[in-house]
Each structure stands twice: as structure tokens, then as C-alpha cells.
Amino acid sequence: MAKIELQGLVKDYGKTRAVHGIDLTIKDGEFVVFVGPSGCGKSTTLRMIAGLEDISDGKLLIADEVVNQREPKQRNIAMVFQNYAIYPHMTVGQNIGFGLYTAKLSKAEKKKRIEETGQILGLEKLLDRRPAALSGGQRQRVAIGRAMVRDPVAFLFDEPLSNLDAQLRSQMRMEIKSLHRRLGTTIVYVTHDQVEAMTMADRIVVMRDGHILQVGTPTDLYENPRDVFTARFIGSPSMNMVDGTIASGVLSTDGAQVEGLTLPAHQGKVLVGVRPHDLMVTDDVDGAGLSARGEVEAVEPLGSETLVHVKLGASQIIATAPGRVVPPIGSTVSLKAEANSLYLFDAASEKALGRA
Amino acid sequence: MTATSAPASELTANSRDIRPGRIIIWTLLLIGGIIMITPLLFMFSTSLKTSGQVYDLRLIPAAPTFDNYLRVLGDGRFMRWFLNSTFIALTVTLSNVFFDSLVGYTLAKFEFRGRYFIFLAILSTLMIPTEMLVIPWYLMSSQLGWIDSYWGIMFPGMMTAFGVFLMKQFFEGVPNDFLEAARIDGLNEFTIWWKIAMPMVVPAISALAIFSFLGNWTAFFWPLIVTTSRELYTLPVGISSFSAESSIQWELIMTGAAIGTIPTLLVFLLLQRYIVRGVMLAGLKG
């Protein structure tokens, strides 16, 4: 187990800068998830930690030692890849044992380790099978097994669940999380799926265009996003954004009415964010907060709730109705978001101004 | 099993519905098949004839005899040529598999300056016909003292541009994740190639091995030029020498050729399943 420190880490591909000098300290035993859209530099950062990409500038420290120049094998980290990278010509046991290829252990000791790992991951009966005979989830477990068997200082996961179906993905999320609880090893996990980030991480690192936008706990990021990108990226469905203006302490928005809110000291154009789960379809629109009326354009009944797509001014927003309420398309509904559930952002810089 | 049963049932269904297009295709295939198999049948047929019957073109000899086989196998030189060919074809094949894959892998999986140029330079040698290379090869062999030696026969084929090209194309299909996973597990680059990448391109290795073995087993021109002593003859050169003595002994040439086809058939039978499997896997994945 070890602390991982990124100090001004830079990655250049020729003249293109993929990662722009990022700083981050990952505590010993912490589960950190890098999240962001494709091309944001999250995988490149992970590969720099692994030693699979050269570091163009800055320092990488693992367990307080600078490892910039060290080969992957000298860093004692293990990595699980998106396509599992388990060798098709070897059995499950051989695949898991491959993690011990360079370990100076006796055959009996290696066998014992492989069996123990197989047991932890529920693969003990499959050790003699070839990967082709395994399901996607089992293959993923073999890949994790190969990483685990070596007792590394940190695990690196590169979008490990993106090839699995939705049900298996949620099951594997919980398995990886409980594995982390049991082993206590530092985990750096890369994904573009914010649900994975929210459900698994101790801390989430939101990246975009090679920069870290925000680092925080899942709740922190959900409640206090620092900019529009993070606000929209974290949470599903995405936060609604409505154009607005603050003039002389009064907020006016495109198609909605705002009443009784304490506004931040700001003048000019703003973006008003409201999460779909805070914007309810209701007849009771009195009191402080944001209220609006609009035409229903689409509905998504999910059982426990119904997502209602409503046309508001020039834009479309998503609101929530209780499970059994499914407003007909074309009808007009009233929407209400309570005070303190609005997020205000500066329209030009897209930085957060505070909540209202 | 399901994969084989499905086409079988399709075939039965289709055979009931015979269309003119199908008849034309079958006829063409049949003609092609006959053209290809006839020389082979005549080779076996002639090997069972006496010298007097050689020009009797009946496919089944009037009085089949195994005398030619006894004569050819009893002649010590034939066995020597057979072993020479075996040794040369095997050595060159192993060398090809090893070096062509190593170079192909390097060109496919490592980023370095001049990589593309080197690949083009290797490919461009494919455009030069063997006949043009024979003189430089001969001059080189003569200066290095390789004339009339095994090494002299083998050296031009120890690495081939075609093999490098074939292996490079296949290695490009091996996902980098496999190699990177091995790198993280602490393997050195040579072991990664040998233990991880090579087992993943077995179909390509089989194809290369078959081409290389057949090419060297049947090689005639260069071994004829570079050898002078009969002990170093390869099988094709040796067999052709039957025609140089007084008159052309077709029955002995055909017998030698018939025996000579056995190893090539064996190599193909042993390795073809890997090729077929490779093609099938590629199809399923695609």
C-alpha cells in the first residue's frame, strides 16, 4: 500500500499537450476515480502512473519515491484493462499465476497464492478452464485476480466494466468496492461513467481537456460543483441549465419565475442550474424557489418516478413526477424547485456563483 | 458442432434447388479440379510403370510394379538427397518463423524513427525476382566460401520479406493491452514476444511455416547453382539429375517426385488445422 503523488504532471504527444501539469495526492488506501469524457486525459494520467507512458514533465511519487524513470515492473503496481487482457492461450490458473511470473517464490507457494486468489474471487472451480469458456464477469474477475495475486502497492483500473452489460456492471461495481474494503489497497480507477464514479469512489477527480476541474467526495461534487461541466457531468439525468440574468439583485430567467431567494452578489448573465430530482411536477407552486409552466414533450416512466421532459422557453428541461403520475404528452404542467436547490453559474466563465 | 451442422443443412436445402448458375460454377470447379489432380495422378501412375510403358498414357498401368520404388529407395544417393532437403527445409523454416516474427513484431508494436522506411525497404525487395538475385548471391557465396555448402544453399531464404510482412500484419491485430499487461507483470520485451504475442498468432506462424517449408522443399534453381557435389544435392536437384544420365528416366523421376510429395503432404496435414482455426476465429470475432 502506498501514497501516490502527482506533482505538475504533464504529457505531450509531439506538439499536442494531453495532460496540463496536474497536481493530486492520492492517500494510502484511498479509492480515487478519474472521470471525464473521452479524450480528457484520464487514461493517459493512469498510464503515466503505471509507467506505460513516459512523463513529459513533473514528478510522480509512489510511496514518497520519485518513480518517473522506473519501468512498470519496478513500480509494483497492478493494472486491470478494459478488455481484461487475459491471455487466451492460458488457463485461468495460469493467467492468475502470470502475475507472479517474476516473483521469486517456490512452485508450491505460487500454487497456494493462485488458489487463495481464486477462492477470494469465486474462481476456485474454474482454475483449469480457458478464458474462452468464461462469461464476461468471470473474465473480469480473472483479470482482477492476476492483479491481486502479486500483492501490489496500488491497483489501477482502466475502464474495467465498460464491456459488461448493465446488470453485471452494477454487480461488479459492488464486488470491486468490497474487494477494496477487504484489501485496503490504494485504487486508481478510470471511467467515463459518472454512476461508477459516484458509487465507488472515496474521492472523484473530474477531468476535462487535460485539466483537473474538481476533486472531492461524491456528495461534495454533487452538492457543490465548481463549474457547469462538473455540475452537468455528475448526477443522472444531467442538471438542467436555464439562461438567466441578475440585475439589481433580481434574478429573471427564460420562461420561469423566481421568488424569495437569497442571491449571490453578481450582476449580468447567469446560468441557472436545477437538478431534475429537485424540479417537481406539482400543482403547489407557492413559496420561495423557482416555478414554471410548460408543455410536456416526452415522458420516461421509471416505476419509482417519472422523468418528464418539458419545453421551457427555448430549451427543454427534465423534471420529476411521482411514479404513478404520467402526464400526457402535449399537456401543460406546473413545475417547482424549492429554495436552495438552484445552482447559479456565471454565464461567461461557467464558474459557480453559489446556490440559491 | 453447431457451426458445422448449420452449413450442412443449408447444403441439403440448396442441393434440391439446382439453378443454372450453380451448374456452371460446379462445372468450372470440376474442370479446375481435374486440371490440378491429373498431373499428380500421372506422377503416381508413371511411378508404377516400367521404362517401356512410360509413354503408354493409360492412367492405370497394364502391369503395375513397385520396382522403381525399390530402385530409388535402394540407391543411397536418394536417401541422402531426401535428408538434405529435410534438413534444409526444416532449418530455413525454423529460421523464418523466428526471425520474420521477431522483425514483424518489432515493426508492428514498437514506435521508432524510420520504422515505416524500414518496412517499405523490406517490402520493396518483394518486387525483385529471384533470377536477378542469383548472381549477387553467387558472387557473395563465392567470396565468403559458401559455394557447395549447406549454408550456401540456405542463407538466401533464412529471412524473407514476405514472412516479415505476413507476421507484421498479424501482430498488428494483437491488442496492445495484452503486451502492456505483461509489461506491468514484469516480463522483458523478448519474453513478452515469445510468451504472449507468439501464441496469439499461431495461425500466421502455421501459414508461414507451410509456405516456407514447401518453398524450400521444392526449391530447384538456387540449390542447383550453388551445389557441385552430388552429396549436397537437394531432392529436386537430385531427381532432375536422373534425366541427365544417358537418357531421361521418367519412371524414376516420377517415383522420386512421388516420394518427395509425402513430407509436404504431412506438413500440410499437421499444420492446416491451425490455419483453418485461425480463419474461423477471425470470422467469429469480426
Image (cartoon, coloured by chain):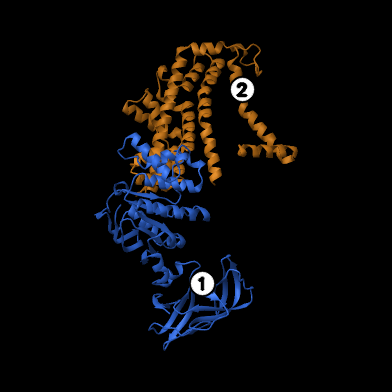
Chain colours: A blue, B orange
Q: Give the vertical position of B45 relative to B103 (above or below).
A: above
Q: Give the vertical position of A63 relative to B76 (above or below).
A: below
Q: Where residue A343 sits: x, y (%)?
A: 44, 76
The residue positioned 41% from the left and 38% from the top of the image is B101
Q: Where residue B245 sits: x, y (%)?
A: 49, 14
Is B50 or B113 nearer to us in this picture? Answer: B113
Q: Quadrant of the C terminus of chain A?
A: bottom left
Q: Label 2: which residue?
A: B41
Q: Which amino acid lies under the numbered mark 2 shown in the image of this protein?
A: Leu
Q: Label 1: which residue?
A: A276
Is A255 or B87 nearer to us in this picture? Answer: A255
How far apart in space, not on screen, are marks 1 and 2 (Cα)?
81 Å
Q: Where residue B93 sits: x, y (%)?
A: 43, 30
Chain designation of label 1: A
Judge the density around disc 1: few (<14), some (14-19), many (≥20) Cα neighbours within 10 Å. Answer: many
Q: Which amino acid lies under the numbered mark 1 shown in the image of this protein?
A: Pro
Q: Give the vertical position of B44 relative to A3 (above or below).
A: above
Circle 2 sits in a helix, a strand or a loop, which is it? helix
